[in-house]
Amino acid sequence: MSDGHSLIELGETIACLTKRLQQACDDEGISSPSVNDVNAASRKSLLETDASAAFELAQALRELEVLAQSPRLSLGILALATLDASILGVIAEFQIASLVPLNGSISYGELSQKTGLDEGRLVRVIRYAVVNFIFREEPVGHVRHTYLSAHLARSPNFNIFVQTVSHVFSLTNAALPLAFRRWPNTAVQTETAHNVAQQTELSFYRWMDANPSMRDMFHKGMVGVSQEGQRLQDVDIRAYPWDKLPENATVVDIGGGWGHVVKDLAELFPSYIFIVQDLQCVVDTAQAMWKEDAARTDKITNVSFQAHNYFDRQPVEGADVYYMRHTVHSNPDKEAIALLSAIVPAMKPGARILVSEYLAPGEEDVASFAKLDFKPMRQMDIMALALCNSGERTKEEYARLFLEASPKLVLKNTYQVPDDPTSCMFEAVYEE
Ligand SMILES: C[S@@+](CC[C@H](N)C(=O)[O-])C[C@H]1O[C@@H](n2cnc3c(N)ncnc32)[C@H](O)[C@@H]1O
């Protein structure tokens, strides 16, 4: 049993890690960041300079923050943390970050004119955000950027991700306690926090079918999160040895959304054939989006889209890879096994199912449970629970799912990159 760290131990750890990070910055000729340093947001971050020191430092600081505040204050702040998300949502909704000059300030009056939000409201929103180091007020009545707000200003995709969270997910996340009260023990996809929040009897994806504006926002958000958000598609591209596939390999991206991952892969591997499958309504929009991006997509000739419900038998026979990213985790075990089983009849011996998701640590890795770097994985796990009664899985749980879909489907490999230890590609091979 551990007693946790003492105040002094934490202080010393923090001092030591801070010096180590400063040294790493000095070695690379990067100047030390500060929260008001707008340009630091476009330089290499501490996380990119020395990931393990940066994570350990943030972890120790969090622990110290809990000790420095009383339980009443710490828990009180947590109980109202939905407001953090909601204020960030307002900032993204009204594109406030892009209206504040990167090297200067803007008055509340001008910002009010540009956003259409009344000045009183705006002042309160910004002053809330300032507590989280998003914007600063200097001089009084004038808004300037910080390290964090400058990132929002420079990253339109991140803004879209935040907007998606506030439009599609936040209500649902907040309804979790009520849903647990109503259905304390269920794996049914129509007995979720989403059903409580949206007052619907439709499962999440069926509800989106019926709400095109929510669906488009969701898919825009998938592109945003994959390109500049919490879990990057670049991780999948770097982690898996795509270049080892046969020269004319066929890769099917099942539940591939608007084809944003395949767009990158197709450019890297022009001799492969890529097929993006999704629900009809999603494929229709995806194709329209590809046309809008003609400057890039016109040069890509090895990608096609196909409407396909992944619970139906897989129509592409004999592909080399059946790839699914952020798709299996939206399904409780029964549905996950059904969707994997639907691929099996189309598979040739040696073909792979490649599942890309967060890797949930097993009980043998109890030390990781309180780690800050696992928080995005925990957030995604609880969001999948709130939306679909599903969640993230351990390696053993994926191995079992594959075997239940077919005894010939064996989890052979997992692929990861060192800078994102919570993301994983699970490769199951169809054996003869
Ligand atoms: C979380 S998104 C992931 C999109 C993309 N793979 C990515 O990583 O950004 C899940 C995808 O599964 C699709 N989907 C949901 N139910 C489906 C079904 N029954 N058949 C086919 N696709 C489905 C959704 O439309 C959505 O594009």
Image: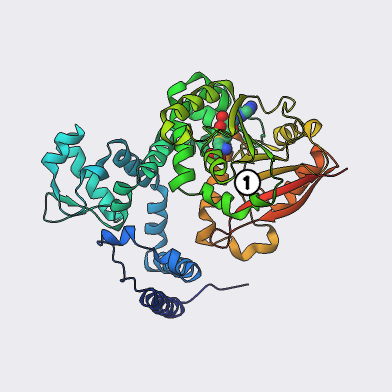
Q: Quadrant of the N terminus?
A: bottom right
> Which residue does the image show at 11% across and 40% down from the upper left?
109
Q: Nearer the viewer, residue 63 or 47?
A: 47
| Left or right, residue 346 beside residue 158 | right
Residue lying furthest right: 432
Going by the numbered disc 1, the residue's amino acid type is Ser
| SS at mark 1 in the image | strand
On whether ligand 1 comes within 8 Å of the CB at mark 1, the answer is: yes
Horizontal arrangement in the rendering, residue 72 relative to residue 137 (left or right): right
Q: Toward the viewer: 188 or 283?
A: 283
> In the image, what residue occupies the spot 58% across and 33% down?
303
Q: What residue would you read off at disc 1?
A: 356
- Hey, which quadrant is residue 116 in on the image? top left
Residue 280's spot in the image, x, y percent? 58, 21
Which of the four quarters of the rendered structure image does ligand 1 lie in? top right
Q: Position of residue 337 (x, y in %)?
A: 75, 36
